[in-house]
Amino acid sequence: MENSYDVRTVKIRTPIIPYQKNTWDCGVFVCRYAYALYHMRHHQVTVLAMLGQTFKDFTVMREFDFGQDSIDPMREKMRLLLSYLVPLYKEAKQREDKEEAMVKREKKKERKKDKEKGEGEGEGEGEGEGEGEGRAEGEGGAEKECEVV
């Protein structure tokens, strides 16, 4: 049986992709690649669709047509977007924190009620005679007071 992958026959492709020309724009380039992929989300990319097309041709598509000169405007768009999103995030986070604190307070109240209810039940019946106390059977079957440690 013939192997479909053979290191001796696999073609190595070097796609033409935009590169940064400095050491600080890598994050913006990654975001720009993600933006290009987002715009291609409806483009069918399958082995069958790529048979007549090399990976190199794929990355030359319009969505990947950017370079260092388009990074400054992209950075400004990102800054503007964040200036709108950060206040919305902070507001949502404050609401979430308040709701979380309220849920914690309610749970604490419920636990306190349950504890008080549990202490109130069975008083005077030999059960729960007080914290740290109980009854045990001594020698000869006689009950005696004992402290639970």
Image: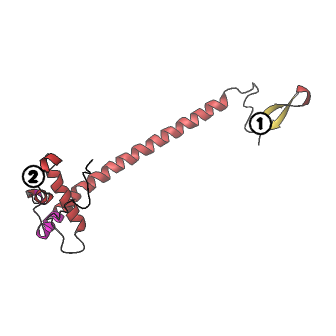
**Is 55 placed left or right of 107 in the picture?**
left
The answer to which of 85 and 39 lies nearer the viewer is: 39
Report the Cα–Cα distance between label 1 and label 2. 85 Å
Q: What is the residue that sits farthest to the front in this orientation? A: 1
- Does dot 2 land on a helix, a strand or a loop? loop
Tell me, yes or no, if residue 46 can be seen here: no
Q: Position of residue 39 (x, y in %)?
A: 14, 51
Q: Which residues are magenta?
A: 63-76
Q: Which residue is mark 2?
A: 52
Vertical order, 138 against 22 (above or below)? above
Q: Residues within 10 Å of mark 2 (few under 14, many from 20)?
A: few
Q: Main secondary structure of the magenta part?
A: helix
Residue at 17% from the left image edge and 56% from the top image edge:
35
Image quarter of residue 63: bottom left
- State yes or no: residue 68 in magenta: yes
- Is the C terminus in the top left, top right, bottom left or bottom right quadrant? top right
Q: Position of residue 72 (x, y in %)?
A: 15, 68
The answer to which of 1 and 11 lies nearer the viewer is: 1
Q: Which residue is mark 1?
A: 133
The answer to which of 25 and 56 lies nearer the viewer is: 56
Vertical order, 30 against 146 (above or below)? below
